[in-house]
Image: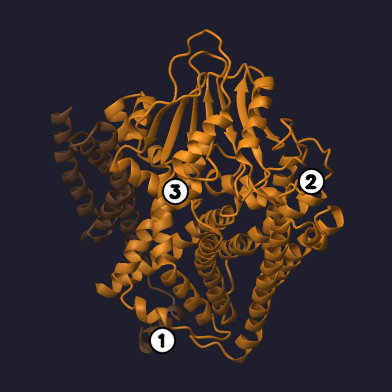
Amino acid sequence: MKGGFRKSMTWLHTWSGLVLGWFLVLVFLCGTASYFRPEISQYMRPELSAAGEPETLKALDSAQDYLQREGMQAEHWFITLPTEREPQRLRVFWSDEDGRHFEQLGVDSAKTVQARETRGGDFFYRLHFDLYAIPALWARCIVGICAMFMLVAIITGVIAHRKIFKDFFTFRRGAHQKAWLDAHNVMAVFGLPFHLLMTYTGLVSLMFLYFPWGMVSEFGSDREAFFEEAQGYSDHIEAAGQSAPLARFSTMAETAMSHWQSETVGRVQVHDPGDANARVSIEVPDTRQVTYRAETLVFDGVSGELLSANPLPSLASHTYGFFYGLHLGRFADTGLRWLLFLAGIGGTGMVATGLILWSQKRYSRWQSGSGPTVMYRLIDALNRTVVLGLPVAMASFFIANRLLPIELTERQHWEERSFMLVWAAVLLLSLCYQGRQAWRHLALVATLGFASVPAVSALTTQRGMLSSIQQGEWLFVGMDAALLVIAIVFAALAWHLGRHKKATLRGDQP
Amino acid sequence: MGKSKAGRSNAARSVSPSAQQIAQRRQKRWAVLMRSLAAMFGGYAVTTLAVVCLSAALPMAPAFAVITATLLSFLILAVIAMWCFAAKTAARAWLGLLLMSLPLAALYGVMR
């Protein structure tokens, strides 16, 4: 019976892992890329500088001047200020009867700045939980179900896998499929705390979508009442209907900076601008603590007076904000961010090696007699499309960003479509062309793709590696270097996959 | 895993399975499916009951009780799902879910 249980668990792991794995590679890889969301966004707007120090007060003046000119019909303004990671990015958002407006402004000009239309790092960030071309609600439910499976898999994995520590120290190098198995195990066990944390905190970040029932049972349909009580304050009151000029936001930000002893402030929101009851709320910067939105200062928009400081009101709110912040990772400095990135790559690698293992095992079986069925061929093609096709599509997203004409209508959608079209092309190719060599050749395509991004960039923009070094634009230098390193990793993978063929000829013992 | 075990399973694979073995395998997979459905749908329903009960019962302001209960929801669901696979049979898993949900539903009825 015990053997039966273990066997059924292995069966469950193989087949649920397969279907889940296709989603999980996408979620892991896009989530990992999102650790560098602002950096990717800046890299994909090469017209704009990404160097310098964030000038919070100057930026806030510029945003206020612009919004007072353009956005007086709106009920809310949202201002995203420059940070150390994106020192030249000042963004404002408002919506009025003309629609929703997102603009990037010059830090000292109160004018919009012109850059190519692109979604930048936001594309990977959204793909991470909203997927593509399906309603966001469905996508989030699919991703949530996958995450829940993952959570159960991790907990049961620790319980069931008695040799967990022994396996951690096992690595049978060489060309055998056991090397893939050991890599799969090492990455799974080594990354276990990270995977557990990310899976759980990811679920937490959307928990009122997945389990709204506590909120519904206590607050009915009044979500706003719930969130006001949960965050401990209300950031606006009924508009008075009388107009009154706004006080300067930069003065309020100075108060906030001395309150937090910090050089910058977080997001700024303005409610009912131009009304006598206008309110301005300023969030604490993300880098000050792990907890997301740990404290918000609310100011009277007309007198500029600080009305209340609002730290999160309870242990429950703090815990929620802490888990949320942990998932977003915005608190991390450069060193920790790279560590988180590597952990994310490890998570992607764990799922990817599982999928590679599935295919490699089947190849050994097909070689020793029974040929592949249609379904097995399809699964094998999907494995390859996910594991290697996704990186190839990512590289083509960067290349499309550099090559698509600047004046193309719907340009940012064409960047996304390039990603999806290349991915679909890889699927088609994978269906027609199979076997170990197909893995190797696709890894070479990924190598070429990533290696060509810095080259295309140097040829088509002013931000080639050499000129970026001369201009001190280190973000562009860093991104180019990172892309080259990724290309080298895929070259190594292609080399390793190439060794398999010779090895299996020498004899592949079970 | 011992070498002998791996050898045995390889040998079993090369011989085509009998009709009885196929029927057994099918039965097993059906049981796995029933357990999975219990873990997913039954688990979600029981967790929802637990979350609304905790939201009402925890001795703190309603919003904080809701947050605490909702934070726990995924762990509750995970434990229930695991229990569904640990139960001796799929039928027992479903029966257990029913037995868990009755007192929770009664409790919620009393508190509301």
Q: Please say if the residues under marks 2 and 1 sit with CB atoms less than 8 Å apart.
A: no
In the rendered image of the structure, the colour used to display chain A is orange
Residue hosting label 3? A325
- What's the CA distance linking mark 3 and mark 2? 31 Å
From the viewer's perspective, is residue A331 above or below residue A433?
above
Task: Indicate the quadrant containing the N terminus of chain A: top left, top right, bottom left or bottom right.
Answer: bottom left
Residue A234 percent location from the top left of the image: 40, 26
Q: Nearer the viewer, mark 2 or mark 1?
A: 2
- Mark 1 and mark 3 on one chain: no
- What's the CA distance linking mark 1 and mark 3? 50 Å
Q: Element type at marker 2?
A: loop
Q: Residues within 10 Å of mark 3 (few under 14, many from 20)?
A: many
Indicate the chain on which mark 2 is placed. A
**Looking at the image, which is closer to me, A246 or A368?**
A246
Q: Is residue A150 visible?
A: no
Residue hosting label 2? A47
- Mark 2 and mark 1 on one chain: no
Q: Nearer the viewer, mark 1 or mark 3?
A: 3
Residue at 45%, 51% (x, y): give it.
A327
Q: Which mark is residue A146?
A: none
Q: Which mark is residue B7?
A: 1
Q: Is residue B1 visible?
A: yes
* Chain depicted in brown: B
Indicate the chain on which mark 3 is placed. A
Does A120 sit left or right of A342 as displayed?
A: right
Q: Element type at marker 3?
A: helix
